[in-house]
């Protein structure tokens, strides 16, 4: 074990040790005309809407890595607490880790207070954390849930600003989805109408934006009940092959058949018990 | 016993101690991690967040204490800082990992999880500090 002649104890958290080296490597790479591999993003359409009894959240399911689809069916609606769910756009790892950290913190907080967590608490925790890292954590989120004060819907941007609105969209397909919302949103919709509206908004994003695609996931949150519909609608099904190039058995005539038996003798037989403790 | 000699206290009281050369193995500049040594490298941080993250806890504490002083008077931060100082003394020798249980409970860190607990957990680090040098630094003999 090598020892470092360091006077102070190591601290946890982000380590900026390799930043200078990475900057030099990137510069050299760009000089040669290549580019460094891109982080996996969720070029996305996510949206949420408040209806009469609760919230409907919707998301597409495509994750991209530059120009390639990295995951055809990824799950973008993350669990925060039994009554709060969060959709994430931006860098996939950032949204995943951020929502997991906030979910853990909210669980500890609710154990400490003894109450069901509120959406405003999750919003404040997320906003303070994202502001602390000044937008370097690329996570754009749509946070929705139902608590003791009713249904709430927030949109949270990577730099830490938040908006509390009745309908929100985020991601690269957000403009297409917002167009559908602006046309057909009404206050106090029924659940079926709200689900149809969100489904149409996400479909608009899927068909008009390259970064979104595949299926539509929905999450309906009402007081005491959560419906996680994955997939709610398979908008893009892969086609089935119509022809088959395999030859049928018997196409080639059989002239002669010879069977050779392979004699194997058992040399050793051991039994190893599994450690199932 | 004077646990922190005057010299080590002075070194740490200035928040921006300078991003000097990172000492790697054998006492020379760690080129693999921090690049070639130049004046620019030593003066500028390698990432926009480096300075703000290094001082985050200090700045949070300062802000909280000054708010507390404005609301409740001088006694509140004084009492709290006295308790922090007492809890900070209940630790193992510097090169060993101590749990900071009392300090965490006082600060409220036992009820929250952040990147400090997930990434680069000091308890899981593969390197160990040089025991003699770390103890000498702590006693202020260095």
Image: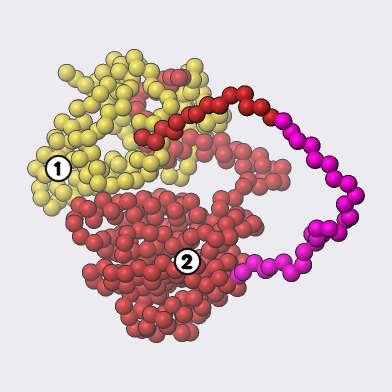
Q: In x, y percent, where is residue B19?
A: 43, 32
In this rendered view, identify the residue nearer to me: B45 or A132.
Answer: A132
Residue placed under numbered mark 2 in the picture: A230
According to the colouring, which chain is red? Answer: A
Please determine whether, in this image, residue A217 is positioned above or below residue A200.
above
Is residue A196 something that shows in the picture?
yes
Please determine whether, in this image, residue B33 is positioned above or below residue A211.
above
Dot 1, how many residues are within 10 Å of its Cα: few (below 14), some (14-19), or many (20+)? Answer: some
According to the colouring, which chain is yellow? Answer: B
Q: Secondary structure at mark 1?
A: helix
Determine whether, in the image, residue A64 is placed left or right of residue A4: right
Write the residue at 44% across / 68% down: A229
Is residue A45 something that shows in the picture?
no
The span picked out in magenta is A236-263
Residue A47's quadrant in the figure?
Answer: bottom left
Disc 2: which chain?
A: A
Q: In x, y percent, where is residue A141?
A: 42, 62
Residue placed under numbered mark 1 in the picture: B77
Dot 2, how many residues are within 10 Å of its Cα: few (below 14), some (14-19), or many (20+)? Answer: some
Write the residue at 45% across / 19% down: A1
Q: In x, y percent, where is residue A61?
A: 53, 63
Q: Is residue A257 magenta?
A: yes
């Amino acid at each position: 074990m090598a020892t470092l002649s360091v006077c102070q104890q190591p601290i946890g958290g982000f380590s900026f040790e390799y930043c200078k080296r990475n900057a030099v490597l990137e510069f050299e790479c760009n000089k040669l005309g290549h580019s460094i591999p891109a982080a996996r993003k969720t070029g996305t359409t996510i949206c949420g809407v408040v209806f009469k009894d609760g919230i409907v959240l919707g998301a597409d399911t495509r994750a991209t890595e530059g120009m390639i689809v990295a995951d055809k069916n990824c799950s973008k609606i993350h669990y925060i607490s039994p009554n709060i769910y969060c959709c994430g756009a931006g860098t996939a790892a950032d949204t995943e880790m951020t929502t997991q950290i906030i979910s853990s913190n909210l669980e500890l907080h609710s154990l400490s207070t003894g109450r069901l967590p509120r959406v405003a608490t999750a919003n404040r925790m997320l906003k303070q954390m994202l502001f602390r890292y000044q937008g370097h954590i690329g996570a754009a989120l749509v946070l929705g849930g139902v608590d003791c004060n009713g249904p709430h819907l927030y949109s949270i941007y990577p730099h830490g600003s938040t908006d509390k609105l009745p309908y929100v969209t985020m991601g690269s397909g957000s403009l297409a989805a917002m167009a559908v919302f602006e046309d057909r949103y009404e206050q106090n919709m029924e659940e079926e109408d709200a689900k149809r509206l969100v489904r149409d908004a996400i479909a608009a994003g899927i068909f008009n934006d390259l970064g979104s695609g595949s299926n539509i996931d929905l999450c309906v949150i009402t007081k005491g009940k959560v419906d996680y519909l994955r997939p709610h609608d398979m908008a893009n099904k892969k086609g089935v092959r119509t022809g088959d190039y395999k030859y049928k058995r018997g196409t080639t005539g059989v002239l002669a058949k010879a069977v050779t038996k392979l004699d194997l003798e058992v040399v050793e037989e051991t039994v190893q018990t599994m450690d199932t403790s | 016993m004077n646990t922190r000699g005057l010299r080590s206290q002075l070194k740490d009281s200035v928040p921006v101690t300078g991003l000097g050369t990172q000492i790697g193995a054998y006492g020379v500049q760690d080129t693999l991690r921090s690049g070639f040594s130049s004046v620019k490298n030593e003066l500028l941080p390698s990432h926009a967040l480096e300075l703000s993250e290094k001082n985050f806890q200090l700045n949070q504490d300062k802000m909280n204490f000054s708010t507390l002083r404005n609301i409740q008077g001088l006694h509140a931060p004084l009492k709290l800082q006295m308790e922090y100082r007492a809890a900070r003394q209940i630790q193992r020798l510097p090169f060993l990992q101590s749990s900071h249980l009392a300090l965490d409970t006082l600060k409220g860190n036992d009820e929250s999880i952040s990147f400090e607990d997930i990434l680069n957990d000091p308890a899981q680090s593969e390197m160990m500090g040089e025991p003699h040098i770390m103890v000498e630094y702590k006693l202020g003999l260095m």
